Image (cartoon, helix red, strand yellow):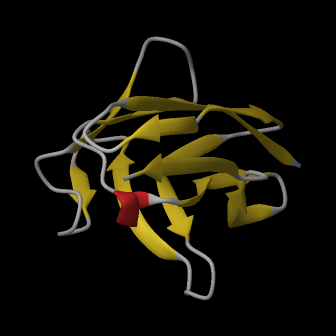
Amino acid sequence: QVQLVESGGGLVQAGGSLGLSCAASGSIFSINAMGWYRQAPGKQRELVATIATSGSTNYADSVKGRFSIATDSAPYTVHLRMDSLKPEDTAVYYCAADATTGRGSYTYWGQGTQVTVSS
């Protein structure tokens, strides 16, 4: 079993910045990639940014140049720096991890954290 614990988020004015963090724990053999997805009311969940263990990153076009994803020295931890936030960035942000455990390889999800950008 893998648990993802998210932190950060909240309310910010347009043009402001926020940071999200996510830490994975459990009986993990390895993690191939971690990332962030978001879901706005009435919309489907969409990719925001991902980072592979190789360090390669992938961003949604809508956040390129404004958001930055990174890991740090703590194992299985990923951060999302969000700058120049826009009202359309308002959504619940979910951390995801492609992890391998004794049960196989699956994608695990966090509970989600609300990000609200006021105009």
> Height in image: 23 above or below 104?
above
Q: Nearer the viewer, residue 92 or 54?
A: 92
Q: Position of residue 78 (x, y in %)?
A: 48, 32
Task: Give the residue at x 34% y 31%.
Answer: 17
Q: Position of residue 115 (x, y in %)?
A: 56, 48
In this rendering, the count of numbered labels is: 0
Q: Nearer the viewer, residue 107 or 36?
A: 36
- The answer to whether 34 appears left or right of 67 in the picture is right
> Height in image: 16 above or below 50?
above
- The answer to whether 117 appears left or right of 31 in the picture is left
Furthest toward the front, the residue is: 119
Q: Position of residue 97 (x, y in %)?
A: 59, 52
Task: Give the residue at x 38% y 59%.
Answer: 87
> Height in image: 9 above or below 90?
above
Task: Give the residue at x 22% y 67%.
Answer: 62
**Residue 18 lies in quadrant:** top left
Furthest toward the left, the residue is: 65
> Height in image: 81 above or below 48?
above
Q: Nearer the viewer, residue 116 or 2?
A: 116
The answer, for residue 34, to whether it is visible in the render is no
Task: Give the residue at x 37% y 53%.
Answer: 119
Furthest toward the right, the residue is: 1
**Residue 74 lies in quadrant:** top right
The answer, for residue 54, to whether it is visible in the render is yes
Q: Position of residue 82 (x, y in %)?
A: 33, 38
